[in-house]
Image (cartoon, rainbow, N blue to C red):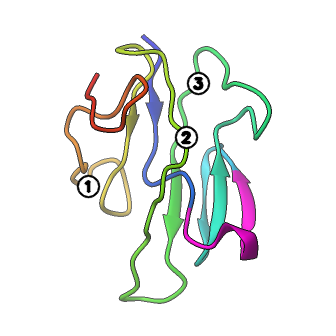
Amino acid sequence: MRLILLYIILLLSFPAFGQVYTMQNGSVTTCSGTFYDSGGSANFYQNGESYVFTICPDSPGQFVQLDFTEWSTQPGADIMFIYNGPNTGSPSFNGLGWSGTALTDGP
């Protein structure tokens, strides 16, 4: 089973003023930007990927807001988790993760 493992991802508010981020292991500190899977804006992610990407707000006390404009993974096989904290031991927003074509769906 392929598992896409993330902290916090996808499109941040005000993408016209922010940078573009592509899925990889690592972290960024930003207040805005556009986030893509490893395929970028024009391609698909690859088989067997498993990344942890952390998005931190610019200042302590601020929050990260995610606005999903497009979503599609292989249902039940490619799962994304979003964690509310600094690592994968933090509570996830949906204990099941997200998979398929609707963000309200679990795996």
Q: Nearer the viewer, residue 28 or 104?
A: 104
Which-is-in-front pick, marks 1 and 2?
A: 2
Q: Quadrant of the C terminus?
A: top left
Q: Which residue is mark 2?
A: 70
In the rendered image, the vertical position of residue 56 relative to residue 43, given as above or below: below
Please report the residue visible at 47 percent of the width from the left and 15 percent of the height from the top.
74
Which-is-in-front pick, marks 3 and 2?
A: 2
Amino acid type, label 2:
Glu
Q: Label for residue 26? A: none
Task: Give the image quarter of residue 84.
Answer: bottom left
Q: Which residue is mark 3?
A: 49
Is 6 on the left-hand or right-hand side of 34?
Answer: left
Q: Position of residue 21 (x, y in %)?
A: 70, 55
Residue stretch rendered in magenta on the structure: 12-21
Q: Position of residue 33 (x, y in %)?
A: 66, 66
Please report the residue visible at 24 percent of the width from the left and 50 percent of the height from the top.
93
**Does residue 57 show up magenta in the picture?**
no
Is 99 on the left-hand or right-hand side of 23?
Answer: left
Q: Earlier in the sequence, mark 1 or mark 2?
A: 2
Task: Give the image quarter of residue 90.
Answer: bottom left
Badges 3 and 2: C-beta atoms under 8 Å apart? Answer: no
Please report the residue visible at 67 percent of the width from the left and 67 percent of the height from the top.
15
Q: Earlier in the sequence, mark 3 or mark 1?
A: 3
Query: Which element carries disc 1, helix, strand or loop?
Result: loop
Total labels drawn: 3
Q: Quadrant of the N terminus?
A: top left
Query: Which element carries disc 3, helix, strand or loop?
Result: loop
Q: Label for residue 90? A: 1
Amino acid type, label 1:
Ser
Q: What is the crowding at mark 3: few (fewer than 14 residues within 10 Å), some, or many (at least 20)?
A: some
Q: What is the crowding at mark 1: few (fewer than 14 residues within 10 Å), some, or many (at least 20)?
A: few
